Image (tube, helix red, strand yellow):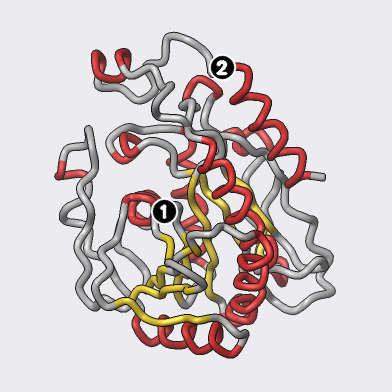
C-alpha cells in the first residue's frame, strides 16, 4: 500500500513499511460485539467523507488491511481520511508498529500543512437523534488504565472552537439535530491517537460524537455533510475497534507482565472471522 495525498503529495512508505499499519493478530483482544458495529459505522462515516471517486481511504486497524485508491490527478486536492483502531489504552505506554505508523501519518499531515483535525471516536455518542460537537475550551482527559500519567497528562489538547461551530452549522444545514457540548472532556479513543500522531503538539482538533442508535444511514449522511472540509485541508479521522469483548478477554498475561502484547494465546475463531468479514466489506 502506498498512501497518496491529492495533487501528487506522495507518502514514500515502501510496501514493507506498510506492515506498521496493523497490530499483530495476537494484539487483538476478544471484544464486545457492539464495538464491531461501531467500527462499521465509523468506517462508513469516513468512507462517505470521501465520494466514490475521491481518494484515499486508509484503514489502519488490527482488523483491516484496506489499501487506498490510486490517485490519478484528475480530482480536486483532498486530504486523506483515516480509520485508526486505537487498540488498548496501554498503547500509550508501549511502542508498537501501529503507533509508528500513526506517527508517520501525522508527520505527513504536518508536512502538508493541514488546517486541523476532525475526529470521531468510539466512546462518545449522543442520545435520541442528536449529534454533539465538543466545544469545551479547556477539556480535561479521562484517566487511562494501566498507563503511567506521565505518558499523557502533560499533553496539551487544542480544541478548535471555530471549526466546531462550523461543523455544527454544516450538520444543521444537512438536517441534523446538532449542538455544541461545552462540558465534554476528551477520552483516550481520540487523544491516544493524537499523542502518537503529533507528539510535539496537538493540532487544532474538533471532536464529533456518534449517535447512540448507530444507524448506518444516519452516519453515512453525517460523513457526507462534513466532506467539504477535506477540500479546505482538514484531516478526518475515525477511531475505534472491530471485535471487542472484554468479558472474554484473557487478562492475566497483561496484568502479570504489564504488557498489552504479552498474549499467550491467539484470538478466538469467531473474532478472526468477524475481523475478516469487516475487512472484506471495506476492501471489496
Mark carried by residue 268: 2
Relative to residue 282, is residue 111 drawn left or right? left
Q: Is residue 161 above or below residue 145?
A: below
Q: Residue shown at 50%/81% (left/top)? A: 177
Occupied quadrant, residue 257: top left
- Residue 119 position, x and y percent, is 47, 64
Q: Secondary structure at mark 1?
A: helix
- Residue 17 position, x and y percent, is 60, 36
For marks 1 and 2, the one nearer the N-term is 1
Examine the rendering and report whether any part of residue 12 can be seen.
no
* Mark 2 surroundings within 10 Å by alpha-carbon count, few (fewer than 14), some (14 through 19), many (20 or more): few
Relative to residue 214, is residue 10 drawn left or right? right
Q: Residue shown at 35%/73% (left/top)? A: 134
Spatial CA distance of label 1 from label 2 is 30 Å
Closer-to-camera residue (16/101): 101
Task: Report which residue position mark 1 lands on.
Answer: 197
Mark carried by residue 221: none
Amino acid at each position: 500500500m502506498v498512501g497518496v495525498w491529492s495533487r501528487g503529495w506522495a507518502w514514500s512508505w515502501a510496501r514493507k513499511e506498510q506492515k506498521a499499519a496493523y497490530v499483530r493478530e495476537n494484539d487483538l483482544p476478544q471484544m464486545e460485539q457492539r464495538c464491531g458495529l461501531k467500527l462499521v459505522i465509523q468506517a462508513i462515516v469516513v468512507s462517505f467523507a470521501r465520494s466514490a471517486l475521491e481518494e484515499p481511504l486508509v484503514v489502519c486497524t488490527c482488523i483491516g488491511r484496506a489499501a487506498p485508491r490510486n490517485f490519478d490527478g484528475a480530482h480536486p486536492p483532498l486530504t486523506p481520511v483515516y480509520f485508526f483502531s486505537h487498540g488498548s489504552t496501554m498503547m500509550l505506554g508501549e511502542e508498537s508498529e501501529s503507533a509508528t505508523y500513526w506517527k508517520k501519518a501525522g508527520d505527513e499531515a504536518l508536512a502538508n500543512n493541514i488546517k486541523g483535525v476532525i475526529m470521531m471516536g468510539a466512546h462518545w455518542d449522543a442520545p435520541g437523534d442528536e449529534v454533539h460537537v465538543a466545544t469545551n475550551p479547556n477539556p480535561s482527559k479521562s484517566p487511562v488504565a494501566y498507563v503511567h500519567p506521565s505518558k499523557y497528562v502533560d499533553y496539551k489538547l487544542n480544541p478548535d472552537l471555530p471549526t466546531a461551530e462550523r461543523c455544527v452549522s454544516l450538520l444543521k444545514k444537512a438536517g441534523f439535530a446538532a449542538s455544541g457540548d461545552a462540558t465534554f472532556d476528551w477520552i483516550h479513543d481520540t487523544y491516544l491517537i493524537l499523542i502518537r500522531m503529533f507528539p510535539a503538539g496537538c493540532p487544532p482538533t474538533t471532536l464529533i460524537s456518534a449517535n447512540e442508535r448507530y444507524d448506518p444511514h444516519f452516519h453515512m449522511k453525517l460523513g457526507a455533510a462534513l466532506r467539504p472540509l477535506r477540500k479546505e485541508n482538514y484531516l478526518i479521522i475515525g477511531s475505534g475497534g472491530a471485535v471487542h469483548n472484554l468479558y472474554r478477554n484473557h487478562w492475566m498475561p497483561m496484568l502479570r507482565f504489564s504488557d498489552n502484547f504479552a498474549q499467550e494465546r491467539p484470538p478466538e475463531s469467531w473474532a478472526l472471522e468477524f475481523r475478516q468479514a469487516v475487512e472484506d466489506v471495506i476492501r471489496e
